[in-house]
Amino acid sequence: MHVGCQLQHWKRVKSGAFILGLLTPELSIHITIHGFLLWTSVGFLMPLGVVIIRMTEGVKSIRMVKVLFYTHVTVQILALLLATVAAVLSLINFENSFNNTHQKIGLVLYGLIWIQPLIAFVRPRRGIRFRSLWYLMHWLLGTGVCVMGIANIFIGLHTFHERTSISVSLWAALFTAEVSFMAFLYLLQHRWQYMMRQGVTQDEQIAPTSHASPTSNQKEMLVMP
């Protein structure tokens, strides 16, 4: 009990110093690690995972579809682990009173991040009645986590600047550039096949081929049960 009280007192002292703008070297390290882990996980790896899985739509090789699918899974697991480490370190190093927007969104985000893989593991096979509902939930939750995570990183940078008066313009600009690039890739994927067809005549598009490529549904059934 005594040790627990000391730990709470230590966290309050550090949090109080942060609120007053007194950024100690130790607290600065904790904040830097916290920001780096969440930037890497929800700010980069999770959006990257979304971009990677969307790449399977235009791929004809079953082998490449498998590579992209398992790369997507690996990237998302790594993002989950980094976000979990960030959550644990936050509980240890910060006073979590949840009295500001950044902390409140972060708490919800940590919960959603863990719900998403649970939904992925209970994916019904194609042809089962609830497959469409599962896909909608998986897509909405994944997209929502990415959007919420990116927004909370910006909020965190703003909160840090408000409490310490330290400029975060460079970090905000770098993060904006990265998010913009990811958004560009996401939108480009949506129109890529259409763009490629612009240089092909209508006769060439409908001409039969001797080796029919598998459809998206066939590829999914072969790769993603």
Image (spheres, grey):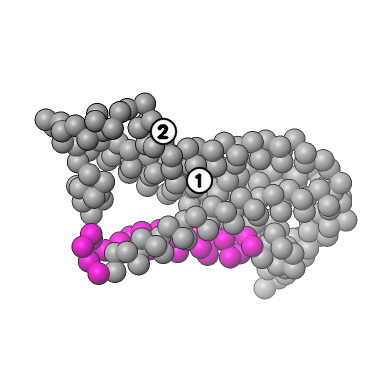
Identified at 71% across, 53% down, the residue is 155
Estimate the x, y position of residue 143 in percent, counting from the top left: 49, 55
In which quadrant of the rendered view does residue 96 lie? bottom right
Estimate the x, y position of residue 210 in percent, counting from the top left: 11, 30
196 sits left or right of 172 in the view: left
The stretch in magenta equals 105-129
76 sits left or right of 16 in the view: left
Q: Which of marks 2 and 1 is in front?
A: 2
Q: Name the residue under label 2.
A: 195
Q: Which residue is more in the foreground, 36 or 9?
A: 36
Q: Name the residue under label 1.
A: 47
Tell whether position 135 is magenta: no
Identified at 26% across, 46% down, the residue is 216
Estimate the x, y position of residue 5 in percent, counting from the top left: 72, 69
Count residues near mark 2 (Cα–Cα under 10 Å), then give few for <14, some for 14-19, many for 20+.
few
Q: Which residue is more in the foreground, 119 or 50?
A: 50
In which quadrant of the rendered view does residue 61 lie? top left
107 sits left or right of 71 in the view: right
* Amino acid type, mark 1: Pro
Tell whether position 113 is magenta: yes
